[in-house]
């Protein structure tokens, strides 16, 4: 057997060994929150969250698979070890920190009101909206916000943001409170969203939007959290983050500039 062949076999064996020993991690996301996470026509889970998550996996040397999970069960699924971390546009809040830990924020957050273009809603006070139908996704900080801010409104909560948006486009609700960036994408880039526009000032109260949007890990997984933090800094430094960002947004969502 020639030296060249022996060398090739050795390299192949080393590569196979490295592949076999690569850490395997599961990335949990919702799959119903475009453009951050969604399931495309082929059934594949895609979006900004997913691409950032996979880029982080590459940096830490892990083979990652993507797991879709309904929002209401996404934190319980992490605690039950159905996946190893959540990257699903989750605001870092004190309430969630009682159940999970978070990495550093991987983008900043704000919420917004969305109304029909012909709407007569011009004020966003409890008095002005007390007889209005307001929608949000259940189990989110947007739901918490409308329940706390508009207690006398007709509040309707939905399992997914897509269902909220559908009822808004169909005229069954008067107002939506949603995450600013997905709602901006919806009103500007979808046929259904052409019905509507963002209104009022961005909602940035830390009581509801927290410290930004982070990756959730189990509270005992300090090592994984720190490795993800390091990987996040690396993809910011080497341009990977910006390349992914530019596929989805016109601004740098990491700085909101």
Image: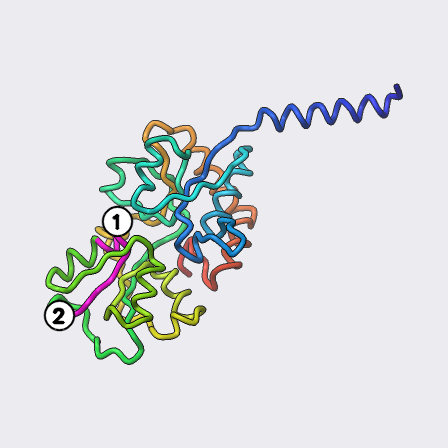
Q: Secondary structure at mark 1?
A: loop
Label 2's element?
A: loop
Quarter holding the C terminus is bottom left
Residue positioned 55% across, 54% down in the render: 243
* Residue 59 magenta-highlighted: no
Which of the labelled discs sits on residue 230, or is there none? Answer: none
Residue interval drawn in magenta: 130-143
Q: According to the image, label 2 marks what residue?
A: 131
- The foreground one among 7 and 20 is 20
Separation (CA) of disc 1 from disc 2: 23 Å
Residue 21 vertical position relative to residue 151 in the rendered view, above or below = above
Chain-order first, disc 1 or disc 2:
2
Q: Is residue 179 left or right of residue 248?
A: left
Counting from the top left corner in percent of width and height, residue 44 is at 52, 49
The location of residue 34, given as percent across then percent down, is 42, 57
**Considering only vertical position in the picture, is 115 above or below 105?**
below
| Residue 139, disc | 1
| Residue furthest top in the image | 1
């Amino acid at each position: 057997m020639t030296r060249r062949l022996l060398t090739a076999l050795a390299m192949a064996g080393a590569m196979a060994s490295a592949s076999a020993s690569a850490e395997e991690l599961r990335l949990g996301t919702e799959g119903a929150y475009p453009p951050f996470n969604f399931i495309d026509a082929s059934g594949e889970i895609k979006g900004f969250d997913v691409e950032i998550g996979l880029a982080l996996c590459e940096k830490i040397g892990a083979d990652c698979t993507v797991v879709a999970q309904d929002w209401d069960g996404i934190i319980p699924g992490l605690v039950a070890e159905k996946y190893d971390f959540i990257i699903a546009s989750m605001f870092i809040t004190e309430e969630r920190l009682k159940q999970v830990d978070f990495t550093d924020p991987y983008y900043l957050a704000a919420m917004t009101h969305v109304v029909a273009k012909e709407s007569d809603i011009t004020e966003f006070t409890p008095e002005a909206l007390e007889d209005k139908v307001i929608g949000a996704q259940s189990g989110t900080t947007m739901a918490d916000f409308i329940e706390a801010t508009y207690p006398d409104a007709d509040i309707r909560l939905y399992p997914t943001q897509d269902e909220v948006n559908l009822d808004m486009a169909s005229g069954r609700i008067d107002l939506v409170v949603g995450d600013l960036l997905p709602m901006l994408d919806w009103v500007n880039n979808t046929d259904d969203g052409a019905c509507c526009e963002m209104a009022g000032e961005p909602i940035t109260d830390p009581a509801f939007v927290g410290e930004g949007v982070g990756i959730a890990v189990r509270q005992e997984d300090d090592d994984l959290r720190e490795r993800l933090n390091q990987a996040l800094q690396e993809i910011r430094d080497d341009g990977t983050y910006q390349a992914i960002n530019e596929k989805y947004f016109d601004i740098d969502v990491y700085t909101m500039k």
